[in-house]
Image (tube, rainbow, N blue to C red):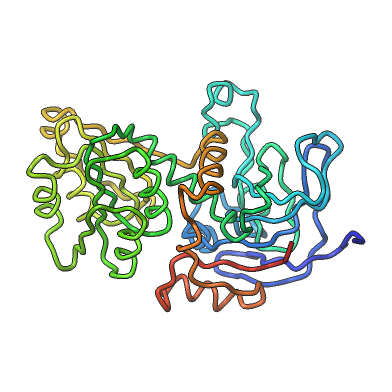
Amino acid sequence: MPRRTEINSLVVKAPGVLELERRPAPACGPTDVVIRVAAAGICHTDFVSMRGQHSAMRYPTVLGHEFSGVVETCGQSVTHLKPGDRVTSLSYAYCGTCMSCRRGQHTACRNALSMPFNLDGAFQELVRMPAIAVFAIADSFSLEEAALTEPAANGYAAAERGGIFPGERVVVIGPGPVGLLALQAAALRQPADLIVLGTRRERLEMAAALGATQVVNVRETDPYRAIMELTDGAGADVVLFCGGGEDAWEVAGRALAPHGRVVVEGLPETPDTKWPVPVFDFTSKQISYLGVSGYTGAHFGAVLHLLEAGKIKAAPLITHRFALEDYRKAFETVEQRAGGAMKVLFRIGDE
């Protein structure tokens, strides 16, 4: 296949200005791979970046950090991949040599490169990525599902951060895509109860199908009372907070059992939001609030294995697919959750 010199790219020109345009194809450095993008998912973070609400944003840039594809070109120093390999990738690349990386704390890498802040994203026909971030996938694993490895890694990291023991009582707040993937990661740890709180019937039904032992529609039932009744008055040992506002935050802390943990994966709408923590409960119940920001390469590799083995399922979350040219409709579908939209993909190329 002759090398393309120009490609279609969905470019954020300035805050709120999104255009499809022809751009030069990315060059492949010695430690890079260039990937022919097959599928790329739209994430809430894409809206934050597009609106200029992230301090690290630069313009112009290309969004999209959940993706899969086929390797088109490998740099001369790349040995674990070859052209034609089917792949997926982290949304960032870590150096592997700084102190944080040597400790396995890749999300704290001092030299990290991240989509879309200093790496162009995958809403385009070809994307360049440092090879350290790229994983080959099984021939039997669909490229659509592979595109969801990135959000699945976020959910897996949240469940691991909670340190869930078999027999513990777990509550997931926010059954969006990451919450539903975190639910499945938590289920693998054999909790006694796996309760999901949400507001949308179709997402709660999905949670039940994916392993929740109980679901609670907080528009119909008092969530604190439901948690206490479902756990025979014991409360939650672990809350995976994957979405929600101040009311959900209050429930998360109030329903904790002694020595309980709240893992905060979902973020509020504005970066200056402050949620209160009752100090008496914090100390007397010896509870923990744990932040989780992204995932390591180890998390990514582990969850990819689980996806390929069918232990975590991504396909049920995919509700809509669009061509890159239909980007306005795609973003509108996500924003309005039209037609029960859960995970919306761009189908950009074939294998």
In the rendered image of this protein, does residue 200 appear above or below residue 223? below
In the rendered image of this protein, does residue 17 appear above or below residue 147? below
Q: Residue 246 location in percent, x, y?
A: 23, 54
Q: Is residue 176 visible?
A: yes
Is 96 on the left-hand or right-hand side of 223?
Answer: right
Which part of the image, by quadrant, shows the N terminus?
A: bottom right
Q: Residue 287 location in percent, x, y?
A: 20, 32
In the rendered image of this protein, does residue 154 appear above or below residue 268? above
The image quadrant that residue 345 belongs to is bottom right
Name which residue lies at 52% across and 32% down. Answer: 108
Is 65 on the left-hand or right-hand side of 7?
Answer: left
Is 125 on the left-hand or right-hand side of 276?
Answer: right
Name which residue lies at 60% across and 74% down. Answer: 322
Query: Observer-nearest residue: 9 or 15?
Result: 9
In the rendered image of this protein, does residue 310 appear above or below residue 39? above
Which part of the image, by quadrant, shows the C terminus?
A: bottom right
Residue sitting at the far right: 2
Q: Residue 70 location in percent, x, y?
A: 74, 54
How many marks the image carries: the answer is: 0
Q: Is residue 28 visible?
A: no
Q: Residue 264 location in percent, x, y?
A: 33, 43
Name which residue lies at 80% across and 34% down. Answer: 79
Name which residue lies at 68% across and 67% down. Answer: 348
Is 183 on the left-hand or right-hand side of 120?
Answer: left
